[in-house]
């Protein structure tokens, strides 16, 4: 079953940019199970929307790649702000270029 999440993070967009780059560097072989990732600046930080093939693949990627990338980018310090995460079951996902419709 597909899994979605929206993260609102009260940290500068420059933190997102650095984290995004570090995650990309650590996942050159691809990201197993990720169907969609969108990041954007907000008035108080940034927001990330992701759709995954399953919650298990999402959780594994966060544990193995995102967590260590956050530690690296933040220099071992506490990240700039705690994210507020909302999980959901995606409906109506269509990605024509990837021939994916859920």
Image (cartoon, grey):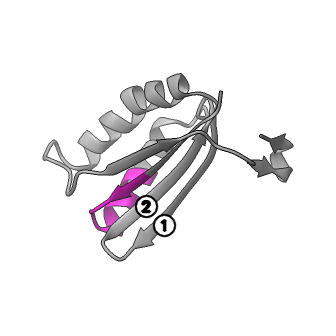
Q: In the figure, is residue 22 to the left or right of 44? A: right
SS class, disc 1: strand
Between the C-alphas of marks 1 and 2, the distance is: 5 Å
Give 63 or 52, whichever is nearer the viewer: 52
Q: Residue furthest bottom?
A: 43
Q: In the figure, is residue 5 to the left or right of 69? A: right
Residue at 75% in and 48% down: 92
The picture places residue 29, in percent across and down from the top left corner, at 60, 31
Span of residues in magenta? 7-20
Residue at 41% in and 33% down: 62
Asked whether disc 1 touches disc 2, contact meaning CB atoms under 8 Å apart, the reply is yes
The quadrant in which the N terminus is found is top right
Q: Residues within 10 Å of mark 1 (few under 14, many from 20)?
A: few
Give 9 or 18, whichever is nearer the viewer: 9
Q: How many discs mark residues in the rendered view?
A: 2
Give 66 or 21, whichever is nearer the viewer: 66
Q: Earlier in the sequence, mark 1 or mark 2?
A: 1
Magenta stretch: includes residue 9: yes
Q: Is residue 8 above or below residue 23?
A: below
Residue that numbered label 2 is attached to: 47
The quadrant in which the C terminus is found is top right
Residue at 34% in and 40% down: 69
Q: In the figure, is residue 6 to the left or right of 85? A: right
Residue 94 - label: none
The picture places residue 90, in percent across and down from the top left corner, at 64, 43
The picture places residue 19, in percent across and down from the top left corner, at 37, 52
Residue that numbered label 1 is attached to: 40
Residue at 24% in and 40% down: 71
The picture places residue 91, in percent across and down from the top left corner, at 69, 45
Magenta stretch: includes residue 15: yes
């Amino acid at each position: 079953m597909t899994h979605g999440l929206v993260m609102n993070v009260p940290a500068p967009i420059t933190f997102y940019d650095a984290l995004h780059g570090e995650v990309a560097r650590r996942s050159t072989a691809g990201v197993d199970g990720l169907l969609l990732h969108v990041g954007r600046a907000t008035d108080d930080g940034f927001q990330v929307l992701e759709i995954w093939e399953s919650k298990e693949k999402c959780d594994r990627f966060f544990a193995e790649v995102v967590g260590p990338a956050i530690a690296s980018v933040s220099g071992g310090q506490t990240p700039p702000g705690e994210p507020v995460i909302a999980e959901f079951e995606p409906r109506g996902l269509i990605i024509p270029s990837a021939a994916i419709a859920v």
